[in-house]
Amino acid sequence: MKKDTFIGSMWNRAYATFPFAKMTITPKGVVIGPSIGALRFAIAEYAFRWEAVERVEVRTPIYGAQGLRFNLSASARKQGGAGWPREAMRLSFGLVTKAQLNRALAVIPESLLERGARSH
């Protein structure tokens, strides 16, 4: 698995709209946080390892963007940023295009994907 980075939106009680959120998928896990360093004071960054992920769901929020929801077996602690929540059991990330979604699905371990998720 290789590293890949995406710009989009994030939501989990706290919210960051496009283009202010970034998700980086690595062989070790995922980091979701602000896309611009200057926003670290306002937008929390969460990091979690693949071992903490129970499953990954493909979501279509009300506003129509494709997205991924990471359901965790252990809370992801925020790495910085103000406000709450300090921990998260579910983190969602909105992708701008279907091509981005397919690119993200290609680098997520297949065993974690909800049944049929690769077919989007």
Image (cartoon, rainbow, N blue to C red):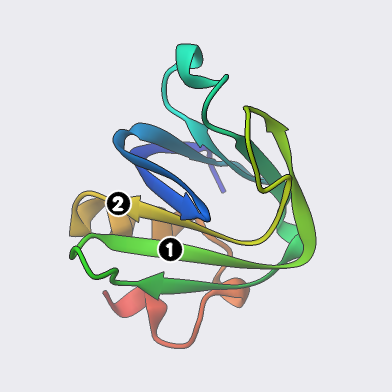
User: What amino acid does circle 2 point to?
Assistant: Leu
Name the disc covering residue 30, or none.
none
Give coordinates of residue 111: x percent, y percent: 62, 76
Give coordinates of residue 115: x percent, y percent: 47, 88
Q: Nearer the viewer, residue 46 or 58?
A: 46
Q: Residues within 10 Å of mark 1 (few under 14, many from 20)?
A: many
Q: Left or right: 42 with respect to 93?
A: right
Give coordinates of residue 83: x percent, y percent: 63, 36
Q: Left or right: 33 with respect to 77?
A: left
Q: Which of the image's four quarters has the C terminus?
A: bottom left
| Above or below: residue 61 compared with residue 36 | below
| Above or below: residue 99 compared with residue 7 | below
Which of the 4 image quarters holds residue 16? Answer: top left
Residue that numbered label 1 is attached to:
68
Give coordinates of residue 9: x percent, y percent: 35, 45
Q: Disc 2 vs disc 1: Cβ atoms closer than 8 Å?
A: yes
Name the residue: 19% across, 63% down: 63
Circle 2 — which element? Answer: strand
Which residue sits furthest top?
38
Residue that numbered label 2 is attached to:
95
